[in-house]
Amino acid sequence: MNLKNALFIAALFASQFGFAQELAQVTFNKKAGFINKAGQEVIALQFEKVGDFSDGVAPALQNKKWGFIDEKGNWVIEPTFDRVKAFDHAVAVVAQGGSWFYINKKAERLNLVSTDKIYDFEDGLAFFKQNNKIGIIAPDGTEILAPKYDLIRKFDGDYARIKNFERWGIIDRSGKEVIPADYDEIGNYMDGSAYARKGTQFGVVVQGEFKGLEAVDKIWDFSTDGLAYARKNKKLGFIDTKGNWVVEPQFDKARAFVNGLAPVYNGSKWGYIDTKGNLVVEYQFEDAEVFSTDGLAPVKVGKNWGFIDKSGKLVIPAQYSITAFGLDMFDAGSKGFINGVARVKFNKTWGFIDTEGNVVGKWYDNAELFSK
């Protein structure tokens, strides 16, 4: 294939799938639009409010009514709704005149299921409620799980926590119980295990069997590294998915292991340990967050935040504020860098920096996370 043909095919592919680029909503002087990762304003700041892109479209507010725009800023659905939720698998939940209902991308009303409450779709599944019990449907209205639970939490990947008669368990996306609702408390499902509580006893459910941990009075969710921090005799350590201590309880505070390192607190400062409990970054920070997949972690020096590499070197000066972005605390990018950029606050304005500390674009009154 010659270069000319290759470039033509690449351009065609990009034009067909351009909506997959990551865009971030930004606001300046009470007008909202979107920028790309080069910092370019690809959708002009012209709306009263916008929401994140999902399923190729984004909600936008104009003249106090919501509609949906495409990646070029053109209206796909005219602004006629009082409130809207994001599209997922070509279905969205909207409100008009005090009533919530489903629509497709032609703005046609859909009657998917008889339900006492309208739930929006996420990753191809939505809850529905009948007679105070919760079930699950697909975007075409197909029943995945008949209403049988008092509560189903949002799916975390392929698994969700369920509650019945004040007891907790876990189901998969097909509705199958992978851990029966036998526990007073339960954590996220990781490698066939989850932390759980029976009465006052904390432990780990391993392949369906509950393993109690002596003197443990609290366990947090497992991180992507397959470790959870747990508290014993007022000190925190780390356990694996089998319920074994991999780092003995010795810390006053701790956060999740991500990419082999975890922030820990010794009563006055934060540092970082490896999965064997070795201190690899000295106790020196006022606060510290988990490492991202970009190999950088936010740390607080004085009143401001900067970023260190895995050796503990401050590679981006401490001159910013940061935010959790509303993401899961165990996500590798829950604070700081996500896919090459970090959202930061500087001199009362918000924007993005790259892993070299360069400002991406310019500063805004507000900026939200990039989404596809």
Image (tube, helix red, strand yellow):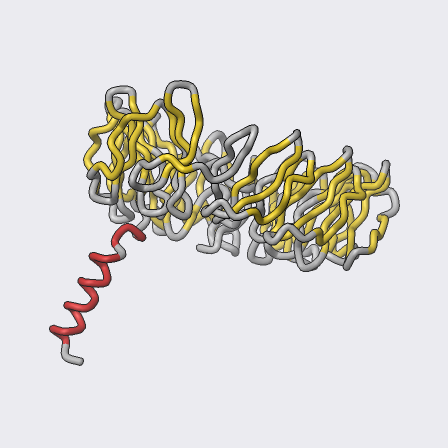
Question: In this picture, is 13 found above or below 178?
Answer: below
- Residue sitting at the far bottom: 1
Question: In this picture, is 188 found above or below 185?
Answer: below
252 relative to 1 in the view: left or right:
right
127 relative to 169 in the view: left or right:
left
17 relative to 174 in the view: left or right:
left
Question: In this picture, is 298 found above or below 9?
Answer: above
- Residue sitting at the far left: 4
Q: Nearer the viewer, residue 144 or 275?
A: 144
Q: What residue is rendered at 37% in x and 23% in y?
A: 96
Q: Nearer the viewer, residue 101 or 152?
A: 101
- Residue sitting at the far right: 214
Count all numbered tags in the image, as a single digit: 0
Residue 164 in picture, x, y percent from top left: 74, 37
Residue 147 in picture, x, y percent from top left: 64, 39
The answer to whether residue 117 shows anywhere in this view is: yes
Residue 102 in picture, x, y percent from top left: 42, 35
Residue 256 in picture, x, y percent from top left: 62, 47
Q: Nearer the viewer, residue 186 or 296?
A: 186
Q: Nearer the viewer, residue 365 or 60?
A: 60
The answer to whether residue 343 shows anywhere in this view is: no
- When asked about the image quadrant of residue 60, the answer is top left
- When asked about the image quadrant of residue 88, the answer is top left
- When asked about the image quadrant of residue 183, the answer is top right
Q: What residue is rendered at 73% in x and 45% in y?
A: 169
Quadrant location of the N terminus in the rendered image: bottom left
